[in-house]
């Protein structure tokens, strides 16, 4: 059995889009692994002060992305093989996987849009809690522990404090600030910038993948119908 005419063109278009889909899975997997091990995010999110830890929401999202990238690579390979073999069974399985993936992506996109500021807010809250504890305590060892955590924030993001000129009581914080900083920049704004850039990158990748998936669902159904109606020799 072999398809002819326009259906044959659809077959190779589906193979091409599936190859792009497989590559997109590789890219998402690579980007998510980079986000997990990026020096800026990992140095901030692995911090711990007394019983308070940095929020894990970002890492949970990254682990989900790693799983999505791996599944996309598998589904892309399944689609490529199903198209070349002209197998209705494989194409049907591929279509079902695409529908599930697309539904999950839409759900994840809605959840991400609703919670897009949550990660940065949680990290700002963590920073403020360490800052306020270090400011209020008089024990030199505890203050030194707070200063160590704050120094990671300040050197990683090149910022210092919550914004504005440091008061006399807050001058102990200046020892944790970058040495080349003349005017203190708010760490709140730097944290927001860091995670808004990451979310923007993830959003672009998700949009491109969604468009590819829509074309693949259309092509896979057209090819399935074409295989079913093609003459048997």
Image (spheres, rainbow, N blue to C red):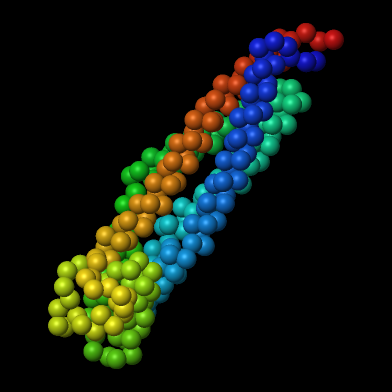
* 117 up-or-down from 5: above or below: below
Question: In which quadrant will I find the C terminus?
Answer: top right
The residue drawn where x is 62% and y is 39% is 22
Q: Is residue 65 above or below residue 129?
A: above
Which residue is found at the position 55% from the left and 56% from the top? 33
Q: Is residue 4 above or below residue 184?
A: above
Q: Is residue 74 left or right of residue 187?
A: right
Foreground residue, 11 or 75? 11
> Residue 147: x, y in percent?
32, 81
**Can residue 35 be seen here?**
yes
Position of 188 relative to 147 (above/below): above
Give the farthest residue toward the right: 233
Q: Position of residue 113 (x, y in %)?
A: 35, 43
Q: Is residue 9 left or right of residue 200?
A: right
Left or right: 109, with 130 as reference point? right
Instruction: Please state, as top left, top right, bottom left or bottom right, where the N terminus lies in the image.
Output: top right
Q: Depth check: 104 or 177 in front?
A: 177
One can see residue 52 in this view? no
Indicate the quadrant where residue 158 lies.
bottom left
Could you say which quadrant of the image residue 226 lies in? top right
Instruction: Give the tally of numbered discs.
Output: 0
Between residue 189 and residue 53, name the one nearer to us.
189
Q: Quadrant of residue 132?
A: bottom left
**Residue 20 in picture, x, y percent from top left:** 60, 35
The residue shown at (27%, 91%) is 139
Counting from the top left corner in percent of width and height, residue 214 is at 52, 27
Which residue is rendered at x = 59% and y = 43% of the image? 25
């Amino acid at each position: 059995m072999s398809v002819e005419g326009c259906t044959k063109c659809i077959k190779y278009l589906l193979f091409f889009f599936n190859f792009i889909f497989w590559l997109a899975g590789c890219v998402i997997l690579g980007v998510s692994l980079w986000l997990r091990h990026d020096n800026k995010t990992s140095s901030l999110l692995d911090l711990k002060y007394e019983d308070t830890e940095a929020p894990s929401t970002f890492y949970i999202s990254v682990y989900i992305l790693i799983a999505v990238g791996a599944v996309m690579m598998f589904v892309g390979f399944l689609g490529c093989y199903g198209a070349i073999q002209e197998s209705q069974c494989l194409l049907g399985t591929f279509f079902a996987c695409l529908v599930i993936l697309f539904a999950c992506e839409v759900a994840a996109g809605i959840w991400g849009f609703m919670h897009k500021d949550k990660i940065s807010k949680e990290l700002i809250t963590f920073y403020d809690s360490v800052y306020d504890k270090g400011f209020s305590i008089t024990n030199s060892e505890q203050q030194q522990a707070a200063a160590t955590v704050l120094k990671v924030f300040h050197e990683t993001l090149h910022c210092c404090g919550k914004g504005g000129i440091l008061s006399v009581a807050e001058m102990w914080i200046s020892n944790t600030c970058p040495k080349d900083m003349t005017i203190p920049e708010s760490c709140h704004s730097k944290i927001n910038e860091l995670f808004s850039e990451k979310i923007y990158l993830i959003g672009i990748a998700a949009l491109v993948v969604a468009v590819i998936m829509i074309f693949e669902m259309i092509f896979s159904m057209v090819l399935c119908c074409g295989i079913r109606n093609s003459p048997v020799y």
